[in-house]
Amino acid sequence: MKTTFDREQVFLHSRARHQFFHTMTTGVKKDGSLSFLEHKCILDGGAYASFGIATVYYSGSLLGGPYRLKNMKYDGYRVVTNKPACGAQRGHGAVIARALFEIQLDRIAEELGMDPIDLRLKNVMEAGETTCNELFVSSFGMREALEAVRDSAAWKKKRSAGGKTRRDGKGIGAACGFFVSGAGYPIYRSRTYHCTVVTKVDEVGGGVTVSSGAADIGQGSDTVLAMITAEELGLPLSDVRVASGDSSLSVDLGAYSSRTTLMTGHACREAAQDVKRQILEAIATKLGQPPESLDLKDGHVVSTAGEMAFSELRDEYLKEHKGFSDLPGGPNLTFAEASRIAFLERGAIVGTGKYRPPPLGGSFKGATVGTSPAFGCSAQIAEVSVDIETGEITVNNISGAHDCGFAINVTQVEGQMQGSMMMGMGEALMEQIIYDKKGRIVNANLAEYKIPTSLDMPNLDAIIVESGEPHGPYGAKEVGEGAIMPVIPSILNAIYDATGARIDELPLTPERLVAALKSKSDKD
């Protein structure tokens, strides 16, 4: 069955980010060391429970990093209202909480007379540390990400000017982010594997098919699974096919919590290694050699211990199996030849892989929300121009650095970062659902619900930081959601730098900015 929504039905029946009301008190010592956070959040969750409980948990739990914060008190409320039900959206639950926290840090830096990035560097966590809410950070390039954006020409110019708020309509702001790389527990609590992958070798032709239940919703997971398989089996990418997005293929819990590369990628690598083991064992047995003396590389079986008589093995099979007769000769067996030999010895060569996180979670109520095998982090600076008279805001440039562990596909990592910048900019400056007095949505259309277009977008600089995540395939972890975390606060901090006006409600429309500037002028 296929269901198609029109634009209005998308607003009424799908799940997205809803309105939050956050109040924070941040404690800090005179030297800039953070000491505590007291945080209250009210989520306007709409009708029905939906995913609101997890959403409001995430709002608090993910403020435990990326800084050393010794004490935190959090009270979260999910309130039922006569609106569409809320759900998960990029940066589930944590985006607006992070925005307020990062704005608080800039306010603290200003009071202490510190550079905002220096304040963050003073408090940043390192790999191997545990947050106050018991989240273990196994890899962490937060310091490197901050240093990367700090060393930009634009930020250096701000520092050379003494780091003071300019208030001349030109501004620059910084912020950081912290997010999970896969939820530590499934939505429905059980011991099930979070994903399984089945990889089968073609019986003729030497290609492989990867079967996964993972849903490629545009994030490029099919490409990542193909690249992992090709890397393990020493094959060109064109020899790997991926069948995905169907629960009949294998188990996969879904495209959420930035989990696919780490979790399904882990299972995919294990399945490819299983295939590799079976093929090399079959060839090694025929040669009378240990399997560890062989490897798969560049489409061939190669020896890791000097020359081997692959040609004799090939000649033997050419004589015995007439249908296997058009393969080229050479010093090494091709993957196609080797997989055919393994098939004739063992039958179908099928590898399986699986992934389930290790036991995670802290010792307090709700501690399982926010747990993850790994955590991504990011830093961004935004540059803006503001028309003081009209309140029109132009974002001129966003530069972001994100720790993705290891970039399996550099283009996709950069694309995810740029997509986060675009979405975050839309939430900061444009996107707003408007209700009438009867609770009906009045702008559920493409004309009045504003989102950034190509004409609105600034220059986007994506800087990749690699930290080598021990729990991810080849050291990889998330980039899909975490990169949105610093976008909103970096833009708002830049607007403050440009105007001296602090904003406490989003989106920051020209009307709201003009009102804030007038209020500030009246107080001055």
Image (spheres, grey):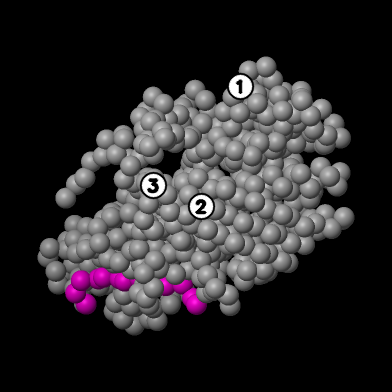
Residue 170 is situated, as x and y percent measured from the top left of the image, at 72, 25
- Residue depicted at 42% across the width and 30% down the height: 449
Observer-side mark, 2 or 1, equals 2
Q: Nearer the viewer, residue 392 or 486?
A: 392
- Where residue 392 is drawn, which disc sits there? 1
Asked if the residue under mark 1 is in contact with the one under mark 2, i.e. CB atoms within 8 Å, the reply is: no
In the picture as drawn, the residue positioned furthest to the front comes out as 437
Local crowd size for mark 1, using a 10 Å CA cut-off: few (<14), some (14–19), many (≥20):
some
Q: Nearer the viewer, residue 12 or 329?
A: 12
Residue range corresponding to the magenta coloring: 346-359
Q: State yes or no: residue 347 in magenta.
A: yes
- Residue depicted at 72% across the width and 47% down the height: 104
Q: Quadrant of residue 300?
A: bottom left
Q: Quadrant of residue 74?
A: bottom right
In the rendered structure, the answer to whether residue 190 lies left or right of residue 515 reads left
Sequence-wise first label, 2 or 3: 2
Observer-side mark, 2 or 3, equals 3
Question: Does the image show residue 471?
Answer: no
- Location of mark 3 (residue): 82
- Location of mark 2 (residue): 43
Q: Amino acid at mark 2?
A: Leu
Asked if the residue under mark 3 is in contact with the one under mark 2, i.e. CB atoms within 8 Å, the reply is: no
In the rendered structure, the answer to whether residue 87 lies left or right of residue 286 reads right
Question: Does the image show residue 511?
Answer: yes
Q: Nearer the viewer, residue 107 or 23?
A: 23
Q: What's the CA distance linking mark 1 and mark 3?
A: 33 Å
